[in-house]
Image (tube, rainbow, N blue to C red):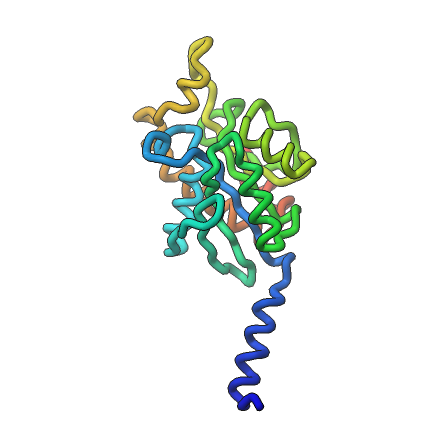
Amino acid sequence: MLSFFGRILSKKNSREDKEDPMKKFLIAGLGNIGPKYENTRHNIGFKILDRLAENEEISFTTEKLGDLAKFKFKGRTFILLKPSTYMNLSGKAVNYWLQKEKVPLENLLVVTDDLNLPFGTLRLKTKGSDGGHNGLKDIQNTLGTNKYNRFRFGISNEYSKGQQIDYVLGEWDGEELKELPERLEKSAELIKSFGTAGVSNTMNTFNGK
């Protein structure tokens, strides 16, 4: 027979196991693993999640198909994922952790770079095309839909003809590095707003800012 305290603990664990899935959010920051890519424009998804984890004083641990970190804020659970599958196979990791953590598709947020936006521009959308982005393309193909939230961080398109790959996989220039810390901070705020204030309010507050 369970003791009084044993019954309380059992009920507590039961409640935790039955956490409301609508209060869980999977934030997938896209990038490529390894020091070669660490400070490249294409890895802004990793960089934004690193800043958020630093702000929340949490660390990433290596799990299946990616590095994971979790924190709670205003009754919501944020699951931060940095896929280890490389950009072109991002969908495999995103889909696995959606299923594993039982996160509803509407609570998924994919964080990625965007060549079509000026540097540092933030834009949250609830659906859309992959725009030629291989990470988004694989996620769309794996999930079978383009109706998932994506947070696009502008990296601009200041490159010469035929130099797109070198530009995307290149490191930030001096001027960008000066502005990046403030942009990372604003990006971290956007993610927390997404989970607490909702998509529409967050779009109104952050898009284009």
Residue 37, percent from left and from top: 37, 31
Residue 140 position, x and y percent, is 64, 33
Q: How many marks?
A: 0
Of residue 145 and residue 41, the one placed in the foreground of this image is 145
- Which residue corresponds to the image point at 48% horizontal and 25% vertical from the top-left? 118
Furthest residue in direction left, as rendered? 174
Q: Residue furthest top?
A: 161
Please indicate whether residue 57 sits to the left or right of residue 89 in the image: left
Above or below — where is 155 with respect to 142? above
Do we see residue 29 in this rendering? yes
Snapshot quadrant of residue 133: top right
On the rendered structure, is 175 left or right of 31?
Answer: left
Percent from the top left, x then y, of residue 162?
46, 10
Residue 112, image x and y in percent?
51, 34
> Taking 36 as reference, is 186 above or below it?
below
Asked whether 114 or 20 is in front, the reply is: 20
Task: Please give the name of the residue rendered at 57% of the width and 84% of the height, measured from the top-left corner.
Answer: 7
Q: Residue at x 59, y 67 (%)?
A: 17
| Residue depicted at x 37% and y 50% | 54
Image: 73 above or below 202? below
Query: Where does the N terminus fall, quadrant-wise?
Result: bottom right
- Residue toward you, 208 or 13: 13
Q: Is residue 2 above or below residue 181?
A: below
Q: Is residue 209 visible?
A: no
The answer to which image quadrant residue 24 occupies is bottom right
